[in-house]
């Protein structure tokens, strides 16, 4: 009896213990799943946060610029984007190409932009020369120095044809948090042109260097613009062509047409030319033949004045109103009317009369005193100069024979009188 009771109790205990074990197993599975799910989400979030933190900190560090800044940018991009990718990979949604691409773009901007700014403005123990400007109106050179230095010394050196350097201007200033601006007047450091005519060999040419030295011992050298540093007009040239007038008299078979020379149209060219430039027969000039034969004009951007005087022998017959050149723009008064032209090529000057198509010309009544040799003298007054501020060109001379032409009866004699031979 007791045996049967024992067996019954044992069976009952067995039936009661099985659900308890299953319940324990079931509880353990839920806890494990919950822990797994919770652990996965945390890892994804952590990796994403770490990625952005690396990118932001790296962007701040890359402000220092230089080669170290470049290393920071590359490292940040690799580590930061890698962490962002791993975070997305471990998330429930997996890697989203659109989100990943946007994140990569933001990462690049957050790191490369600070690096570029740091390289531009300079940081601790470095500096940069910025905002270099050539002011033609005030004839000045201006620039700004930014960076993490206390003091900067700027100098302008001239470099001779042989490479010898001479200091022409220098100035020292405190840089400060917002940088400091320097202004150098051209007249304080100009010592010769930087450009000459094409196909010319000119040993007088001077190049210019801006040298900036920080109190940290670092030096930056910038070569100045050669066009701006060609300030001195050294040569002038003239060309002439006759101005004709036609008169009709009578009618029908008794009518007659008479053509006469009544003056000259005058063209002017100023700049830097070959030293042996010269007038040619026919009233033209060697500078009109092109760079192969005579050398192309070296353009001067500066401030100077030009006077043109027409002489016969030593007697002054006419003087053109003063021509004022600012930069390359020539301004002059002709008969009360202001005219302008660009002194980058030949310009037509004013005169004392106006012909057809509003062409200004020098009327023969205002300068001509019979056939003979006439000199067209140019005087250039430079604002900037090395030794002599005034350049005089008196080589433009032609034999004018207006009287012979106007009185000639044969076409051959008329043609000969218009040859305008040099004299």
Image: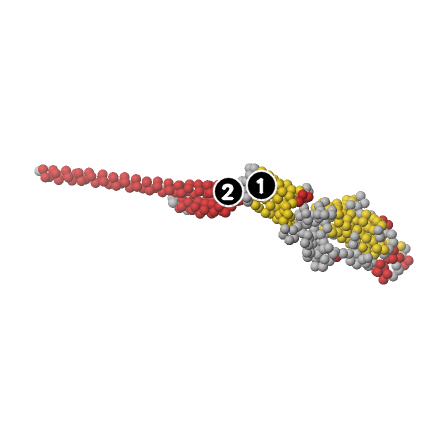
Element type where label 1 sits in the image: strand
- Snapshot quadrant of residue 290: bottom right
Position of residue 395 measured from the top left corner of the image (x, y, whole percent): 78, 54
Can residue 100 be seen?
no
Q: Name the residue rendered at 39%, 41% in the picture.
A: 46
Is 1 placed above or below 395 here? Answer: above
**Crowding at label 1, few (<14), some or many (≥20) Cα neighbours within 10 Å?**
many
**Front-lying residue, 134 or 257:** 134
Residue 331: where, in percent of width, then height? 75, 45
Label 2 sits on residue: 63
In the image, what residue occupies the spot 44% across and 45% down?
A: 80
Image side of residue 343 versus residue 99, left or right:
right
Report the side of 336 relative to 26 (left or right).
right
Please identify, in this view, whether the residue under mark 2 or under mark 1 is nearer the observer: 1
Residue 69, given in percent of the width and then of the height, sits at 49, 45
Tally of numbered discs: 2
Q: Position of residue 48 (x, y in %)?
A: 42, 42
Can residue 211 be seen from the camera position used here? Answer: yes
Q: Earlier in the sequence, mark 2 or mark 1?
A: 2
Please state, as top left, top right, bottom left or bottom right, where the N terminus lies in the image. Answer: top left
Q: Residues within 10 Å of mark 2 (few under 14, many from 20)?
A: many
Tell me the residue that label 1 is attached to.
152
As drawn, the label of residue 238 is: none
Q: Is the C terminus in the top left, top right, bottom left or bottom right quadrant?
A: bottom right
């Amino acid at each position: 009896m007791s045996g049967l009771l024992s067996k019954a109790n044992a069976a009952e205990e067995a039936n009661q213990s099985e659900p308890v074990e299953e319940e324990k197993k079931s509880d353990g599975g839920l806890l494990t799943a919950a822990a797994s799910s919770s652990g996965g989400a945390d890892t994804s979030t952590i990796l994403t946060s770490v990625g952005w933190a690396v990118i932001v900190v790296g962007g701040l560090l890359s402000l220092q610029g230089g080669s170290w800044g470049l290393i920071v940018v590359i490292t940040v991009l690799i580590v930061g984007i890698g962490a962002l990718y791993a975070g997305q990979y471990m998330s429930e949604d997996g890697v989203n190409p659109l989100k990943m691409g946007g994140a990569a773009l933001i990462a690049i901007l957050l790191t490369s932009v600070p690096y570029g700014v740091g390289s531009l403005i300079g940081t601790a123990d470095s500096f940069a020369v910025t905002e270099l400007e050539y002011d033609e109106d005030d004839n000045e050179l201006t620039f700004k120095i930014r960076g993490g230095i206390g003091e900067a010394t700027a100098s302008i050196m001239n470099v001779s044809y042989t490479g010898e350097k001479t200091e022409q201007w220098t100035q020292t200033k405190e840089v400060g948090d917002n940088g400091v601006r320097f202004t150098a007047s051209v007249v304080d450091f100009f010592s010769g042109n930087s450009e000459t005519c094409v196909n010319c060999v000119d040993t007088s040419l001077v190049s210019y260097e801006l040298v900036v030295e920080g109190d940290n011992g670092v030096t930056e050298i910038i070569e100045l613009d050669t066009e701006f540093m060609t300030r001195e007009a050294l040569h002038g040239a003239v060309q002439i062509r006759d101005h004709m007038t036609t008169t009709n008299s009578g009618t029908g078979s008794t009518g007659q047409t008479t053509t006469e020379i009544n003056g000259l149209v005058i063209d002017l060219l100023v700049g830097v030319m070959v030293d042996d430039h010269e007038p040619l027969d026919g009233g033209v000039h060697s500078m009109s033949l092109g760079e192969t034969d005579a050398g192309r004009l070296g353009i001067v951007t500066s401030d100077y004045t030009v006077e043109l005087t027409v002489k016969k022998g030593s007697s002054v017959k006419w003087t053109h109103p003063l021509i004022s050149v600012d930069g390359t723009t020539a301004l002059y008064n002709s008969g009360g009317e202001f005219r302008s032209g660009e002194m980058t090529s030949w310009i037509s000057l004013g005169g004392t009369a106006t012909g057809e198509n509003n062409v200004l010309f020098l009327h023969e009544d205002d300068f001509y005193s019979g056939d003979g040799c006439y000199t067209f003298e140019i005087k250039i007054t430079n604002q900037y100069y090395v030794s002599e501020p005034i350049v005089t060109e008196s080589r433009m001379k032609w034999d004018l024979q207006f009287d012979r032409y106007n009185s000639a009866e044969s076409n051959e004699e008329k043609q000969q009188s218009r040859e305008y031979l040099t004299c």
